[in-house]
Amino acid sequence: MPAERYPSEFPAPHDSVPAPSAPPMAPDVEVALARSEERFRLATRAIGGFVYDWDARTGRVEWTGGLLETIGVAPSEADPTIDWWHGRVHPDDAARVGADGHVDLLHDPTRTSYEFEYRVRHRDGRWLWVADRMHVVRDTEGRPVRAVGGVTDVTARRAAEAAGAARARRLDRLRELGAALARMLTVSEVARAVLPRAVAAASATVALLLLRTADDPDLLEAVNGVGGAAHLAAGWRLPIASSLAVARAVREGVPVWGDARDAAPAADEARALAAATGASAWVALPLRVDGRVLGTLALGYPAAPEVDDERREFLMGFADQCALAVARSRLVEAERAARARAERALAHTQRLQRLTAELARVPTPQEVAEVVLREGTAAVGAATGSVSLLGPDGDTMTTVASIGWAGRGLWERYSLAASGSPGLEALRSRVPVFVATPQELAARFPAAAASAAAAGLQATAVLPLAIGGRAQGYVSLSWSAPHAVTDEERALLEAIAAQGAQALERARLLEAERVARAEADAANRAKSDFLATMSHELRTPINAALGYAELMALEVHGPVTPAQGDALARIRRSQLALLSRINDVLSFAKLEARRVSFDLQPLDVAQLLADVEPLVAPQVAAKAQAFAITPLVQPLHAQADAERVSQILLNLVSNAVKFTPPGGRIALEASSLDEGRRVAIRVRDTGRGIPADRLESVFDPFVQVDATLTREQGGTGLGLAISRELARGMGGDLTVESVPGEGSTFTLTLPRGERRNHAAHA
C-alpha cells in the first residue's frame, strides 16, 4: 500500500524499520522472522484458508487464493493493499471495518486482536457476510510490524439466523394476533383486528375480509377493508362464481398466491376491482373451518408478489386464526341473537298476557279499542294509531280510539264507499296491510299518500279486527320514518289484533246480553207487577164470596138444607184452593222481583218439625197414611226465617201426602251436615217417585211431573219453585233424590244457628 495513502494511519517504511544507517536487526531475529513467514506460507497453502498477511512496514497485503476465490476475484485482479479490500466492503459497514476497525487496531498498542462481521461484494454483485479475525504483531517498542488475519464466509449462517429471526417475528405476530382475536366477539371486530395486521405482516397495500352471506351462500360480502379497499366494506357483494382471485379461493378452497393470471386480469370485473383498490394482484386465503369455507382474507398488491414457502405457511396460519375467530364470533353472535329472540319472545308473551288481563277487565268496545291501540303502538314503537269499527249497518266506519294523528277525528263516521285507503283494503281483504316507505304508499295508495305526507308519516301497518270470517274494524299504526315490519313484529301485531277482535266480540255479546237482560228484567217487572195486581184484584172478590158463603152456612140469611150445606162446603173448599193458588202466584212474583225479606234467627229444628204435624194431620188421616217424625239425637238449631221454613215444610209434606197413595208412609227427620256447619231437614215418602230426567225440572216454575189434563192432583206447579227460592234466599238449598216406584226424599239444607242462652239474656 503506498505510504501517501495512509500518512497518519500507517508508518512509512523508513519510520517502521530502522534506517540503513541504523544498527541492523539482530541476526537471530531476522532468522526467526524469516522462518515464521515461511511457516505461515506453508500453512496457508496446506489448508487453503481465507487468509491475508498485512506488512505494516510496507503496507503490502498478501491475499491467499482461497480468500480471493471466495469473493470471485483472480489473484491477478487483486491489489495487494488494504485499501483495495476496504473498497469492496458494504457502504453501511465501511466505517466500522476501515477507520474504526483495521486502522484503529494498528494504532491502539493495548490491543492485539480484532474480530467482527461485515459484508463484502462478490464479483457478481452479491454481498457476502464474512467473519474477519485479525492479530497484530508488534516490535519491542509496541509498534505494529505485521497483521495476520483470517476471513470466513458466514453468509449461510447469517441467512439462517435472519430466517430464524423472521420466523420468530412471524410467530410473535401470530401470537399477538391470537391474543387480540380472543377478545373479539363480533365479525366486525375480527375484521378490524385482522386486516391492519395482515397488511403489515404481508407487506400488502390493500386487505379485504369477505364472507359468505347468510341469505345466499353463493354470494360473498365484504365485512371490512383497509387501504384502497376501505370503501368496499359497505356491503360490497361478489358472486362466488366470479373469475376474481378472491372468489376463486372460496370456490376452490385453496389459496391464490397472486399468479400471472391475477397480476394481469383480463376480465372487466378484475379491471374494475384494480381501478377501485389500486391492487392489480391478489393473494386470496380461504377461511376454512371443519371442512367448510367461510370466506376469504384477500391481500392486494400493485404487482404480483414473491411469496416463498415460509411466507405462505405464515399467511395460511394468519388466515386459519382469522377463520377460527370468525367461526367463534358467529357462534357468539348466534347465541346473542337467540338470546335476544328469546327475550323478545318472552317480552311479547308478557305483553300479550298483560293485554289479555286488561281486555278481560274492560266491558265496552271503546275501552277494548283503547287497550289494543295502546299496546300495539308501544309494541312496535309506532308514532300514531287509531281503531275504527264497522257500524251496525255494515256500510259506515267510526273511529273510536286514537293516539296522535289518526287521520280522522274521534267518533267521526265515514262511508265504506271510499276507496284507496290501507284501512279499507285490510277490512275488505281481512289481510294485514304493511307499507314500509312513502314511495310504496304513493304507489299502492295514492289517495292516502298526500295526507300521510302532510302529517309527516312515512310507514303504515293496518290489521283487520276479524273473528269467524267477519270483520269488525281495523287498527292502524303509523311511523314518522320508514319502517319495515319484521316477522316478529308482524306476529305480535297479528296476535294483538286477534285478541282485540275476540275482546270486541265479547264486548258486543256482553252489550247485547246487558240489553237483553235489561229488557228481560223490565218484562219480569211488568209481569210481576201485573201478577201482583191481578192477584190482589182476584183475591178481593174471592174473599168476599168466601165470606158470603160462610154467612149462608151459618144460616144468617135463613135455614140451609143438608144438600145446600154440602154445596156451600164445596164452594168454600174450592175458594180456599183458588186463594192458595193466587197466593202462590203472588209469592212467586215477589221472589222474582226480589221483594221478599227474611228475618233470620236461630230456630229450634225440633220445634219446626213438630209444628208441621197438626197442619197436615187431616190430609194424612183422610188418606189413611202413616206420618212420623224421627226424634233428634241432639238439639239442632238453624239460622233461618221461621215463617219461610214453615211454608217450605208445609209445602213439601203436603206434596208428599198428595203424591203418596193411601196407606203409604211419610217421614220427617233432621240431622247436621259438614261437621255441624249446616242442618238438613228431610221429607221422605213412599209415593210414585220422579223420573231421573225430571229431578231438576220439578223446581222450575209452572212445571209438574204429570202435566196431562187428566192428572189427578191439581196445583200451579209453583210450590217447589217457591220453596227452593226461599231456601236459597236464607243461604240454604232444596234438593231431591228419587227412585220411581219407591218414593222421593226432599232435603232442605240451612245454615247452622247458634243456640240462644236465655239465662244469659235474662
Image (cartoon, helix red, strand yellow):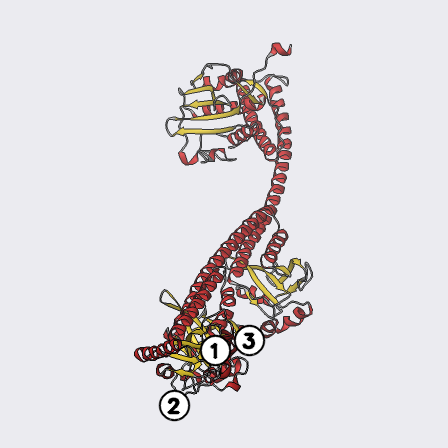
| Gap between marks 2 and 1 measured at Cα | 51 Å
Residue placed most toward the observer, 185 or 589: 185
In primary-sequence order, the first of circles 1 and 3 is: 3
Distance between mark 2 and mark 3 Cα atoms: 63 Å
Residue furthest to the bottom in view is: 76
Give the residue number, with chain letter if any, for mark 3.
Answer: 231
| Amino acid on which the number 1 mark rests in the picture | Gly
Q: Residues within 10 Å of mark 1 (few under 14, many from 20)?
A: many
Q: Say which residue label 1 marks.
A: 300
**Mark 2 or mark 3, which is nearer to you?**
2
Quick one: label 2 or label 3, which is nearer the N terminus? 2
Indicate which disc residue 147 carries: none
Residue holding disc 2: 76
Q: In the image, what residue occupies the spot 43% across and 76% down?
A: 147
Q: Amino acid at mark 3?
A: His
Q: Residue at horizontal 63%, vertical 42%?
A: 522
- Helix, strand or loop at mark 3: helix
